[in-house]
Amino acid sequence: MKYLKYILLLLLLIIVGGSIYVATLDSDFEVTRSRTINAPAEVVFKNVADYKNWPSWSPWIEKDTLTELTFSDASSGVGAMYGWKSDIIGEGKMETVNITDNEVIDQKITFISPYESTSDINWKFEPTDSGTNVTWSMKGKNGFMEKAYMLFAGGIDKMVGPDFERGLIKLDSVVKEDMNKYSVTVNGITTHGGGYYLFNTTSCKIEEVSAKMQEMMPLVGMYVQKNNIPMAGAPFTLYHKYDIENNAVIFSCAVPVTDKVITDADSGIQTGMLKPFTALKTTLKGNYDKLEEAWTTAMKHIADNGLKEVPTNPYLEVYQTDPMTIVNPADWITEIYIPVEDNN
Protein backbone atom coordinates (compact mmCIF):
# COMPACT_ATOMS: atom_id res chain seq x y z
CA MET A 1 0.00 0.00 0.00
CA LYS A 2 2.86 2.32 0.86
CA TYR A 3 4.40 1.90 -2.61
CA LEU A 4 0.99 2.32 -4.22
CA LYS A 5 0.58 5.68 -2.50
CA TYR A 6 3.96 6.81 -3.83
CA ILE A 7 3.04 5.65 -7.32
CA LEU A 8 -0.30 7.47 -7.19
CA LEU A 9 1.42 10.57 -5.87
CA LEU A 10 3.99 10.40 -8.64
CA LEU A 11 1.25 10.03 -11.26
CA LEU A 12 -0.57 12.99 -9.74
CA LEU A 13 2.58 15.09 -9.91
CA ILE A 14 3.11 14.07 -13.53
CA ILE A 15 -0.47 14.95 -14.41
CA VAL A 16 -0.32 18.30 -12.61
CA GLY A 17 3.09 19.12 -14.04
CA GLY A 18 2.03 18.06 -17.51
CA SER A 19 -1.13 20.13 -17.26
CA ILE A 20 0.85 23.18 -16.19
CA TYR A 21 3.27 22.63 -19.09
CA VAL A 22 0.45 22.24 -21.62
CA ALA A 23 -1.28 25.34 -20.24
CA THR A 24 1.89 27.41 -20.78
CA LEU A 25 2.21 26.39 -24.45
CA ASP A 26 1.42 29.08 -27.01
CA SER A 27 -2.23 28.85 -28.02
CA ASP A 28 -1.68 30.57 -31.38
CA PHE A 29 -0.64 28.44 -34.32
CA GLU A 30 -0.01 28.82 -38.05
CA VAL A 31 0.65 26.25 -40.73
CA THR A 32 1.81 27.44 -44.17
CA ARG A 33 2.88 25.65 -47.33
CA SER A 34 3.59 27.00 -50.84
CA ARG A 35 4.04 25.57 -54.32
CA THR A 36 4.62 27.13 -57.72
CA ILE A 37 2.16 25.76 -60.29
CA ASN A 38 2.86 26.24 -63.99
CA ALA A 39 -0.51 27.78 -64.79
CA PRO A 40 -2.10 31.26 -64.87
CA ALA A 41 -3.34 32.53 -61.51
CA GLU A 42 -6.91 32.73 -62.81
CA VAL A 43 -6.97 29.02 -63.64
CA VAL A 44 -5.60 27.92 -60.25
CA PHE A 45 -7.84 30.40 -58.41
CA LYS A 46 -11.02 29.13 -60.06
CA ASN A 47 -10.18 25.56 -59.11
CA VAL A 48 -9.70 26.45 -55.44
CA ALA A 49 -12.59 28.94 -55.24
CA ASP A 50 -15.21 26.34 -56.22
CA TYR A 51 -15.72 23.75 -53.49
CA LYS A 52 -17.05 21.20 -55.98
CA ASN A 53 -13.48 20.93 -57.31
CA TRP A 54 -12.02 20.08 -53.90
CA PRO A 55 -12.75 16.31 -53.96
CA SER A 56 -10.37 15.93 -56.92
CA TRP A 57 -7.35 17.21 -54.97
CA SER A 58 -8.25 17.25 -51.26
CA PRO A 59 -5.58 15.33 -49.27
CA TRP A 60 -8.18 14.35 -46.68
CA ILE A 61 -10.88 13.04 -49.01
CA GLU A 62 -8.12 10.96 -50.61
CA LYS A 63 -7.86 9.14 -47.26
CA ASP A 64 -11.55 8.20 -47.37
CA THR A 65 -13.17 8.21 -50.80
CA LEU A 66 -16.49 7.33 -49.12
CA THR A 67 -16.59 10.65 -47.29
CA GLU A 68 -20.10 12.13 -47.26
CA LEU A 69 -19.95 15.61 -48.84
CA THR A 70 -22.52 18.41 -48.82
CA PHE A 71 -22.41 21.71 -50.74
CA SER A 72 -24.32 24.97 -50.51
CA ASP A 73 -26.41 25.99 -53.54
CA ALA A 74 -23.59 28.28 -54.65
CA SER A 75 -20.34 26.34 -54.39
CA SER A 76 -18.12 29.39 -54.97
CA GLY A 77 -18.12 33.01 -53.85
CA VAL A 78 -18.54 34.65 -50.44
CA GLY A 79 -20.92 32.57 -48.33
CA ALA A 80 -20.27 29.33 -50.22
CA MET A 81 -19.95 26.29 -47.95
CA TYR A 82 -19.13 22.62 -48.04
CA GLY A 83 -19.18 19.98 -45.35
CA TRP A 84 -17.75 16.51 -44.83
CA LYS A 85 -18.51 13.55 -42.60
CA SER A 86 -16.37 10.45 -42.34
CA ASP A 87 -15.50 7.72 -39.88
CA ILE A 88 -11.85 8.23 -40.82
CA ILE A 89 -11.32 11.98 -41.25
CA GLY A 90 -14.08 13.18 -38.93
CA GLU A 91 -16.71 15.84 -39.49
CA GLY A 92 -16.49 19.52 -40.32
CA LYS A 93 -17.39 22.35 -42.65
CA MET A 94 -15.74 25.18 -44.58
CA GLU A 95 -17.12 28.61 -45.50
CA THR A 96 -15.73 31.29 -47.82
CA VAL A 97 -15.69 34.65 -46.04
CA ASN A 98 -13.72 36.88 -48.44
CA ILE A 99 -12.47 36.82 -52.03
CA THR A 100 -10.23 39.02 -54.17
CA ASP A 101 -10.49 37.52 -57.65
CA ASN A 102 -7.34 35.68 -58.75
CA GLU A 103 -5.43 36.91 -55.69
CA VAL A 104 -6.85 35.92 -52.30
CA ILE A 105 -9.41 33.55 -50.76
CA ASP A 106 -10.23 33.67 -47.04
CA GLN A 107 -12.16 30.80 -45.47
CA LYS A 108 -13.27 29.64 -42.04
CA ILE A 109 -12.93 25.97 -41.23
CA THR A 110 -14.88 24.36 -38.39
CA PHE A 111 -13.99 20.92 -37.06
CA ILE A 112 -16.81 19.08 -35.31
CA SER A 113 -15.04 15.78 -34.71
CA PRO A 114 -12.73 14.21 -33.60
CA TYR A 115 -12.54 17.51 -31.66
CA GLU A 116 -14.23 20.89 -31.94
CA SER A 117 -12.27 23.92 -33.17
CA THR A 118 -12.43 26.80 -35.61
CA SER A 119 -9.54 28.17 -37.68
CA ASP A 120 -8.91 30.68 -40.45
CA ILE A 121 -7.79 29.46 -43.88
CA ASN A 122 -6.02 31.78 -46.33
CA TRP A 123 -5.02 31.25 -49.96
CA LYS A 124 -2.73 33.57 -51.92
CA PHE A 125 -2.10 33.39 -55.68
CA GLU A 126 0.96 35.31 -56.86
CA PRO A 127 1.97 35.34 -60.57
CA THR A 128 5.60 34.49 -61.25
CA ASP A 129 7.72 33.99 -64.36
CA SER A 130 7.15 30.24 -64.07
CA GLY A 131 3.43 30.27 -63.26
CA THR A 132 1.62 30.99 -60.00
CA ASN A 133 2.98 30.72 -56.48
CA VAL A 134 0.14 29.27 -54.38
CA THR A 135 0.31 29.70 -50.60
CA TRP A 136 -2.08 27.78 -48.35
CA SER A 137 -2.21 28.80 -44.68
CA MET A 138 -4.20 27.96 -41.55
CA LYS A 139 -4.22 30.11 -38.42
CA GLY A 140 -6.05 29.69 -35.14
CA LYS A 141 -5.95 29.16 -31.40
CA ASN A 142 -5.78 25.85 -29.59
CA GLY A 143 -7.59 25.22 -26.34
CA PHE A 144 -6.12 23.09 -23.57
CA MET A 145 -7.31 19.76 -25.02
CA GLU A 146 -6.13 20.66 -28.54
CA LYS A 147 -2.70 21.69 -27.20
CA ALA A 148 -2.42 18.40 -25.32
CA TYR A 149 -3.44 16.44 -28.39
CA MET A 150 -1.00 18.31 -30.64
CA LEU A 151 1.79 17.85 -28.10
CA PHE A 152 1.51 14.07 -28.34
CA ALA A 153 1.04 14.26 -32.13
CA GLY A 154 4.32 16.15 -32.54
CA GLY A 155 2.84 19.61 -33.14
CA ILE A 156 0.23 20.93 -35.53
CA ASP A 157 2.75 21.79 -38.26
CA LYS A 158 3.98 18.20 -38.32
CA MET A 159 0.40 16.95 -38.25
CA VAL A 160 -1.21 19.23 -40.87
CA GLY A 161 1.77 20.44 -42.95
CA PRO A 162 2.23 17.19 -44.93
CA ASP A 163 -1.48 17.24 -45.83
CA PHE A 164 -1.11 20.77 -47.19
CA GLU A 165 1.93 19.67 -49.20
CA ARG A 166 0.05 16.67 -50.59
CA GLY A 167 -2.95 18.84 -51.44
CA LEU A 168 -0.83 21.34 -53.36
CA ILE A 169 0.86 18.54 -55.31
CA LYS A 170 -2.53 17.11 -56.24
CA LEU A 171 -3.88 20.58 -57.09
CA ASP A 172 -0.90 21.07 -59.42
CA SER A 173 -1.71 17.79 -61.17
CA VAL A 174 -5.44 18.54 -61.45
CA VAL A 175 -4.86 22.03 -62.87
CA LYS A 176 -2.44 20.74 -65.50
CA GLU A 177 -4.86 17.97 -66.46
CA ASP A 178 -7.67 20.51 -66.75
CA MET A 179 -5.59 22.81 -68.95
CA ASN A 180 -4.68 19.88 -71.21
CA LYS A 181 -8.28 18.91 -71.99
CA TYR A 182 -9.26 19.25 -75.66
CA SER A 183 -11.66 18.02 -78.30
CA VAL A 184 -11.64 17.95 -82.09
CA THR A 185 -14.96 18.11 -83.92
CA VAL A 186 -15.47 17.79 -87.68
CA ASN A 187 -18.44 20.12 -88.23
CA GLY A 188 -18.93 19.28 -91.90
CA ILE A 189 -19.17 21.16 -95.19
CA THR A 190 -19.90 24.88 -94.97
CA THR A 191 -19.49 28.08 -96.93
CA HIS A 192 -16.95 30.57 -95.65
CA GLY A 193 -18.28 34.04 -96.30
CA GLY A 194 -14.95 35.62 -97.26
CA GLY A 195 -14.49 39.40 -97.06
CA TYR A 196 -11.79 42.02 -96.73
CA TYR A 197 -8.88 41.57 -94.35
CA LEU A 198 -5.63 43.24 -93.32
CA PHE A 199 -2.54 41.06 -93.20
CA ASN A 200 1.22 40.62 -93.17
CA THR A 201 3.03 37.69 -94.77
CA THR A 202 6.19 35.70 -94.25
CA SER A 203 7.86 32.42 -95.15
CA CYS A 204 9.73 30.21 -92.72
CA LYS A 205 10.46 26.65 -91.61
CA ILE A 206 7.54 24.66 -90.18
CA GLU A 207 9.02 24.69 -86.66
CA GLU A 208 9.25 28.50 -86.78
CA VAL A 209 5.56 29.11 -87.53
CA SER A 210 4.42 29.53 -83.94
CA ALA A 211 7.15 32.04 -83.04
CA LYS A 212 6.62 34.01 -86.25
CA MET A 213 2.88 34.09 -85.67
CA GLN A 214 3.36 35.52 -82.16
CA GLU A 215 5.41 38.34 -83.71
CA MET A 216 3.19 39.06 -86.68
CA MET A 217 -0.39 38.84 -85.41
CA PRO A 218 0.00 41.61 -82.78
CA LEU A 219 1.35 43.95 -85.50
CA VAL A 220 -1.83 43.56 -87.53
CA GLY A 221 -3.99 43.97 -84.45
CA MET A 222 -2.14 47.11 -83.34
CA TYR A 223 -2.50 48.63 -86.83
CA VAL A 224 -6.25 48.03 -86.70
CA GLN A 225 -6.54 49.58 -83.23
CA LYS A 226 -4.27 52.54 -83.96
CA ASN A 227 -6.29 53.48 -87.03
CA ASN A 228 -9.72 52.74 -85.49
CA ILE A 229 -10.56 50.24 -88.22
CA PRO A 230 -13.73 48.20 -87.52
CA MET A 231 -13.09 44.47 -87.28
CA ALA A 232 -15.45 42.03 -89.00
CA GLY A 233 -14.65 38.89 -87.03
CA ALA A 234 -11.93 36.86 -85.36
CA PRO A 235 -8.26 37.00 -86.47
CA PHE A 236 -7.01 34.15 -88.63
CA THR A 237 -4.00 32.62 -90.31
CA LEU A 238 -4.09 32.03 -94.05
CA TYR A 239 -1.77 29.26 -95.27
CA HIS A 240 -0.59 29.83 -98.84
CA LYS A 241 1.91 26.96 -98.91
CA TYR A 242 2.67 24.16 -96.47
CA ASP A 243 5.48 22.02 -97.87
CA ILE A 244 6.37 19.23 -95.42
CA GLU A 245 8.91 17.64 -97.77
CA ASN A 246 10.94 20.85 -98.02
CA ASN A 247 10.09 22.11 -94.50
CA ALA A 248 8.72 25.38 -95.82
CA VAL A 249 5.63 27.44 -95.04
CA ILE A 250 4.24 30.65 -96.52
CA PHE A 251 1.45 32.16 -94.46
CA SER A 252 -0.30 35.41 -93.55
CA CYS A 253 -1.59 36.67 -90.21
CA ALA A 254 -4.85 38.47 -90.79
CA VAL A 255 -7.67 40.46 -89.21
CA PRO A 256 -11.01 40.65 -91.05
CA VAL A 257 -12.36 44.17 -91.64
CA THR A 258 -15.70 45.52 -92.84
CA ASP A 259 -14.43 47.44 -95.90
CA LYS A 260 -11.43 47.76 -98.16
CA VAL A 261 -8.65 49.70 -96.43
CA ILE A 262 -5.82 51.63 -98.09
CA THR A 263 -2.91 50.96 -95.76
CA ASP A 264 0.22 53.06 -95.23
CA ALA A 265 2.94 52.06 -97.66
CA ASP A 266 5.60 51.71 -94.96
CA SER A 267 3.40 49.86 -92.43
CA GLY A 268 4.12 46.34 -93.62
CA ILE A 269 0.35 45.75 -93.53
CA GLN A 270 -1.60 44.99 -96.70
CA THR A 271 -5.25 44.62 -97.67
CA GLY A 272 -6.65 41.39 -99.08
CA MET A 273 -9.99 40.04 -100.19
CA LEU A 274 -11.35 36.52 -99.71
CA LYS A 275 -14.10 35.36 -102.02
CA PRO A 276 -16.69 33.01 -100.47
CA PHE A 277 -15.62 29.37 -100.77
CA THR A 278 -16.79 25.89 -99.85
CA ALA A 279 -14.82 24.31 -97.01
CA LEU A 280 -14.71 21.47 -94.54
CA LYS A 281 -14.97 23.09 -91.12
CA THR A 282 -13.26 21.47 -88.12
CA THR A 283 -13.22 22.91 -84.60
CA LEU A 284 -10.52 22.45 -81.98
CA LYS A 285 -11.40 23.31 -78.40
CA GLY A 286 -8.10 23.29 -76.55
CA ASN A 287 -4.49 24.38 -76.67
CA TYR A 288 -2.90 25.37 -79.95
CA ASP A 289 -0.40 22.53 -79.56
CA LYS A 290 -3.29 20.20 -80.55
CA LEU A 291 -3.74 21.93 -83.92
CA GLU A 292 -1.62 19.37 -85.75
CA GLU A 293 -3.99 16.63 -84.56
CA ALA A 294 -6.98 18.74 -85.59
CA TRP A 295 -5.58 19.22 -89.10
CA THR A 296 -4.80 15.49 -89.33
CA THR A 297 -8.36 14.63 -88.27
CA ALA A 298 -9.80 17.01 -90.87
CA MET A 299 -7.59 15.62 -93.64
CA LYS A 300 -8.54 12.06 -92.73
CA HIS A 301 -12.22 13.00 -92.92
CA ILE A 302 -11.65 14.36 -96.41
CA ALA A 303 -9.91 11.16 -97.51
CA ASP A 304 -12.44 8.85 -95.85
CA ASN A 305 -15.41 10.64 -97.38
CA GLY A 306 -14.12 11.06 -100.92
CA LEU A 307 -13.92 14.86 -100.73
CA LYS A 308 -11.59 16.74 -103.03
CA GLU A 309 -9.46 19.66 -101.89
CA VAL A 310 -9.24 22.88 -103.91
CA PRO A 311 -5.66 24.03 -103.24
CA THR A 312 -6.14 27.30 -105.13
CA ASN A 313 -8.53 28.44 -102.37
CA PRO A 314 -7.35 29.49 -98.89
CA TYR A 315 -6.66 27.21 -95.93
CA LEU A 316 -7.59 29.02 -92.73
CA GLU A 317 -7.17 28.82 -88.95
CA VAL A 318 -9.63 31.18 -87.27
CA TYR A 319 -8.96 32.03 -83.60
CA GLN A 320 -12.36 32.58 -81.99
CA THR A 321 -10.99 33.20 -78.50
CA ASP A 322 -8.40 35.67 -77.24
CA PRO A 323 -5.76 33.98 -75.01
CA MET A 324 -5.24 37.32 -73.27
CA THR A 325 -8.79 37.28 -71.89
CA ILE A 326 -9.46 33.51 -71.77
CA VAL A 327 -6.36 32.18 -70.08
CA ASN A 328 -7.24 28.48 -69.78
CA PRO A 329 -6.05 26.79 -73.01
CA ALA A 330 -8.79 24.16 -72.58
CA ASP A 331 -11.30 26.90 -73.46
CA TRP A 332 -9.58 28.18 -76.59
CA ILE A 333 -11.58 27.65 -79.80
CA THR A 334 -9.93 27.43 -83.21
CA GLU A 335 -11.80 26.79 -86.45
CA ILE A 336 -10.06 25.17 -89.40
CA TYR A 337 -11.36 25.67 -92.96
CA ILE A 338 -10.02 23.39 -95.68
CA PRO A 339 -11.24 24.30 -99.19
CA VAL A 340 -13.08 21.46 -100.94
CA GLU A 341 -15.17 21.07 -104.06
CA ASP A 342 -18.87 21.88 -103.76
CA ASN A 343 -20.67 18.66 -104.73
CA ASN A 344 -24.16 20.19 -104.53
Image: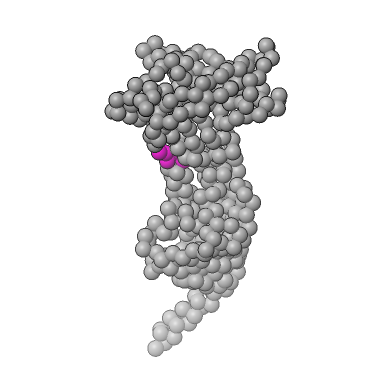
> Residue pushed farthest front?
344
Instruction: Please state which of residues 168 and 319 is positioned toward the viewer in this rendering.
Output: 319
Q: Quadrant of the C terminus?
A: top left
Residue at (47% x, 20% y) in the render: 314
The image position of residue 260, as x and y in percent, is 63, 20
Q: Give the side of residue 127 with respect to residue 282, left or right.
A: right
Instruction: Please state which of residues 98 and 253 is positioned toward the viewer in this rendering.
Output: 253
Q: Is residue 16 visible?
A: yes
Q: Give the side of residue 66 with respect to residue 140, left or right.
A: left
Q: Is residue 171 magenta?
A: no
The answer to which quarter of the image holds residue 42 is top right
Vertical order, 104 against 128 (above or below): below
Instruction: Please state which of residues 293 and 78 is positioned toward the viewer in this rendering.
Output: 293
The answer to which quarter of the image holds residue 299 is top left
Vertical order, 99 against 237 (above or below): below
Vertical order, 73 against 324 (above or below): below
Q: Is residue 146 visible?
A: no
Residue at (47% x, 48% y) in the render: 171
The image position of residue 91, as x and y in percent, is 46, 69
The image position of residue 301, as x and y in percent, is 33, 29
> Residue pushed farthest right?
227
Q: Give the side of residue 224 with respect to residue 209, left or right.
A: right
Residue at (40% x, 84% y) in the render: 3
Q: Which residues are magenta?
A: 179-184
Residue at (40% x, 18% y) in the render: 310
